[in-house]
Image: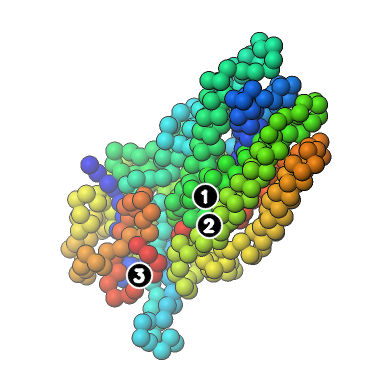
Amino acid sequence: MTQLAICTDLDRCVGCLACSVSCKVVNGVPIGNFWNKTLRVGPTPKEGGSGQFPDVETYFLNVQCQHCENPQCVSVCPTEASHKLPDGTIQIDKSKCIGCQFCVMSCPYGVRYLNEEEGVVEKCTLCQQRTAQGELPQCVSQCCGMARWYGDAEAGIESFEGPRGEKLGDFVNDFTEDQVYQLTDVGNGPSMFYIMRNIKWQGVE
Amino acid sequence: MEIQIPLVIFTSFLAWAAGIFGTQCVLALQKRGGAAQLPALIASVVILAVGGIAVVFHLTHPFNLFNGFGHLTSGITQELIAIVLLVVVMVLYFLMLRRSEDNTVPQWLAVVGIVLTLVLIFAMGHSYMMPSLPAWDTVLQMLSLLGAACVMGPATVAFIGALVGEKIEGIGLLAVIGAAVNAVLSAAYMFAMEASSASFQSFQYYFDPTHPNAALANPADVSLFTGDSMTALVVAVIALIVALAGAFVGKKQDSWKVWGAVVAIAGLVCAVALRIMMYTMGETLFMLY
């Protein structure tokens, strides 16, 4: 089994939006649609602090299709336009998409968009056009903070590859298992990982 | 979420059609309905067709309807199968009615009709049960469609009976029970929707650079008592009370030409308002994106 995924070290992310912008450029994402967004979470008052600066904490969260293990978007698709590939990624066959948008409704993260010009739903493909040629997803290769890493989750996130060829396990600061987070799971099993060491993760995993 | 008018019409009208056909099947079990059976069946088919045509306009192109439905885990495919089966039974029902000299159909066909109307209602409700949307992901959402069928079905059949001059024994009681069931199930679903806001993810302060001027998404704002939801809530509550009162008055006066229409229209208004609430309350669990 393979589950291609991206792991983001949020302690390295500086919120430069290079991932979001490069995604739009390389994939021709229509204006108003975003296959990859960088949100600023915070400033959140630290527990036990004054509630004022400097007792606050902030992190940047990159959100995109989580290429779930048990994707609801695939289950609800009436034409199997949304499908899961053997590499674990969720892809959309545009020739089959009827634009019913049930996949948009079923996605817990709201990362699917209707391309109004083409009348089909689109989302992050994990840059399939690039990874098929041995390259990294554009958001990973353009990450100037060396925060984004790409690889097979089944092999462990330490084996994920960065833009300069290093491995995550050899490059980033040490982290423990409980410092690896995923977005809220409502039975869909998100596959993307986020590492954050000393800041409180907001929301429910 | 943006209100999807075609889907609102589709679900409301299909519940209406299922309600009418289900009611006439219940009457057929007791060999009642008489001259009202055939016009009720025609009304049911026409309303089903209106709902079916409406849903086509939800697709980005109407011809996408022919784009290879068939993924069985999809609620849309399940709905389509249920509709096709129901139409087949309706055709059989029509043929049996035409063959019959006393406007009756075989009991087995009536039972199959009742089962398929329930299958259609539950398939339709189930297709909207998504863990991503807390306001939708409840059995009460599915049951609210059953409530809509229960209020609109008997009232419409009673109205048709009055129009064709057929006195249908027991239709008044059915209309009152239907309106009461709708009132209870609709109210229960409205409570469930209001309670669903507890499931949303709260991130306190955040900033989305792609929407710099948008207000922070706040789970507390996802309430039936705000904005468009409030309007739909008031309309739904008034409509379900009117339907209930109309059914009582209709039964008391045994006059369905007016009250049957009043109850059916109030039931439809209640169903539409409830579906509109589904969309105004239809925020995804992860509200930030």
* Residue A127: percent from left, percent from top: 37, 47
Relative to A154, residue A144 above or below: below
- Location of residue B61 in the rendering, given as x and y in whole percent from the top left corner: 61, 34
Residue type at the position of mark 1:
Leu
Sort mark 2 into few (<14), some (14-19) or many (20+) by Cα contacts within 10 Å. Answer: some
Residue placed furthest toward the left: A170
Give the residue drawn at x 56%, y 53%. B189
Q: Tell me the quarter of the picture where residue B255 sits.
A: top right
Q: Are marks 1 and 2 in contact (CB under 8 Å)?
A: yes
Q: Which residue does the image show at 36% across and 51% down from the upper left? A: A187
- SS for callout 3: loop
Q: Neighbour class for label 3 at 10 Å: few (<14), some, many (≥20)?
A: many
State the residue position of label 3.
Answer: A201
Comparing B4 with A13, the one in front is B4
Question: Would you say the residues marked 1 and 3 are in contact, meaning their CB atoms lie under 8 Å apart?
Answer: no
Estimate the spatial distance between the alpha carbons at disc 1 and disc 2, rounded to whole Å: 7 Å
Q: Which mark is residue B140?
A: 1
| Residue B272 visible (yes or no) | no
Task: Determine if marks 2 and 3 fall on one subunit.
Answer: no
Q: Can you say whether B49 is above or below B221 in the image? A: above
Where is mark 2, residue-wise? Answer: B192
Tag 2 subunit: B
Q: Quadrant of residue A130?
A: top left
- Please report whichever mark, 1 or 2, sits nearer to the chain's N-terminal start: 1
Q: Nearer the viewer, residue B156 or B54?
A: B156
